[in-house]
Image (spheres, helix red, strand yellow):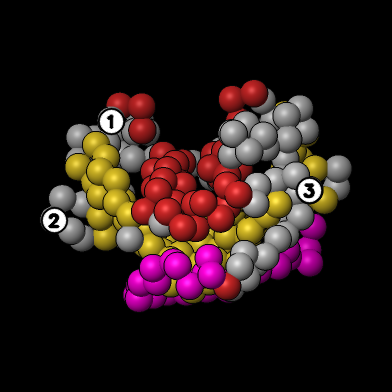
Amino acid sequence: MYTLDYLVTTSTCDSEGRLKLYSALQMMQDCSEMWIDSEPAARKFFNDNNMTQLLATRQVEVIRVPRFKERLTVTTSIYEVMPMYGFRNTFIRDAQGNPCYRTWSMGAFVDLATGKLARISDDAIASLTLEPKQEMNYRGRRISLPKQDGTVMDPVRVMHADIDYNRHMNNANYVRIAMELLPEGFEVRDMRVEYRIAARLDDLLTPTVYSIEGGYIVSLAVNGQPSAIIEFLQ
């Protein structure tokens, strides 16, 4: 398990002084990325083989939204590993240890040179510390788009500020863009994201918004193909 401590600061809050979901996702990503430092054998394998792990799907349960100046602890741990995929929990807890966000995610192991899926060795898998699967409401990783037509919105260009060191759009930025399309006052209590095709600098993301029971699905497409699909439920 890997842990980072945070303070809810001005830049992470919305107009009401509440932690933005976008900012919470960034905290989760930071902790998940830094986790590799706690697994030196796995870090060496990835470095030696020019590999990385890219997020394929994430589900977030919002229990309580923290407020300005609250102290938070983010923990991440892996509970299952297969040759091409890994599964982890990442929780954000308040100062009393109560969960504010419960998440699970799946990452795909990728060859950085080819961008294709790659296998990690049995020795690398054996070296990893597996933790118990945390309690939350686990939902499927696949998000099916509704059959009815959605509302197509104006395209959004991928900017320099959206790109991370993997040279494609950072995972949290898809959610940031999609949330701008939700109705005013919509309170997200459960969110799923399925990442399909990485968006890159200057790509145009075309959003399509679908109304579903209890919430919305937003598809962000590049050249007609979904890059990311995000489901928001109240």
What residue span does the magenta drawing correspond to? 123-151
Q: Position of residue 211 (x, y in %)?
A: 64, 58
Q: Nearer the viewer, mark 3 or mark 2?
A: 3
Q: Quadrant of residue 166?
A: top right
Please indicate whether residue 67 sits to the left or right of residue 115 in the image: left
Magenta span dominant secondary structure: loop
Q: Which mark is residue 175?
A: none
Q: Which mark is residue 9?
A: 1
Is 140 covered by the magenta stretch? yes
Q: Residue furthest left?
A: 96
Q: Quadrant of the N terminus?
A: bottom left
Q: CA–CA distance between discs 2 and 1?
A: 19 Å
Name the residue beneath numbered marker 2.
96
- Which amino acid type is marked by label 2? Gln
SS of the residue at dot 1?
A: loop
Q: Quadrant of residue 85?
A: bottom right
Q: Quadrant of the C terminus?
A: bottom left
Residue at 73 percent across and 29 percent down: it is 201
Q: Is residue 234 visible?
A: no
